[in-house]
Amino acid sequence: MPKRILQGTVTSDKNEQTVTVLVERRFTHPVMKKTVRTTKKYRAHDPENRFKVGDKVRISECAPVSKSKRWEVVTEASA
């Protein structure tokens, strides 16, 4: 099965080797037919502490690194 890749913004880099990434998802509501925005935060593994708050990044699924980390930062997203 292919690994999912999501794009989001780094909202926290306070932890060592970890960044929190906010991912926004847009979809049309099935009944109201209105575009709905939902957000979700993912904790991603960043071994070199390269990314700072505000950076746009791509994250990919990986094997569990810790209790809450199931994602790893792949690259910096292009604008």
Image (cartoon, rainbow, N blue to C red):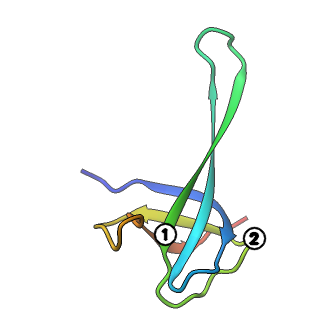
User: Secondary structure under badge 2?
Assistant: loop
Quarter assignment of residue 61: bottom left
- Residue type at numbered disc 2: Gly
The residue where tag 1 is placed is 44
Residue reaching furthest to the top:
31
For the view shown, which residue lies furthest in the front direction?
67
Q: Residue at x 52, y 91 (%)?
A: 48
Q: Residue at x 38, y 63 (%)?
A: 70
Q: Identify the mark nearer the N-term, 2 or 1.
A: 1
Say whether marks 2 and 1 touch (CB < 8 Å).
Answer: no
Residue 57: image tag: none
Q: Amino acid at mark 1?
A: Ala
- Give me the disc on residue 54: 2
x, y percent for residue 17: 50, 84
41 to the left or right of 32: left
Residue 2, given in percent of the width and then of the height, sits at 30, 53
- Please, is residue 9 above or below residue 24 in the view? below
Instruction: Count residues near mark 2 (Cα–Cα under 10 Å), then give few for <14, some for 14-19, many for 20+.
Output: few
Look at 62% across and 29% down and name the residue there: 27
Q: Indicate left or right for 74 with 13 as reference.
A: left
From the viewer's perspective, is residue 79 above or below residue 26? Answer: below
Q: Nearer the viewer, residue 5 or 79?
A: 5
Residue in view at x 50 percent, y 80 percent: 46
| Residue at the outermost left position | 1
Question: Which image quadrant for residue 62?
Answer: bottom left
Real-space Cα separation, disc 2 to disc 1, in angstroms? 15 Å
Secondary structure type for disc 1: strand
Across and down, in percent, residue 23 comes to 61, 52
Local packing at callout 1 (Cα closer than 10 Å; few below 14, some 14-19, many 20+) is many
Provide residue 10's location: percent of width, then percent of height.
66, 68
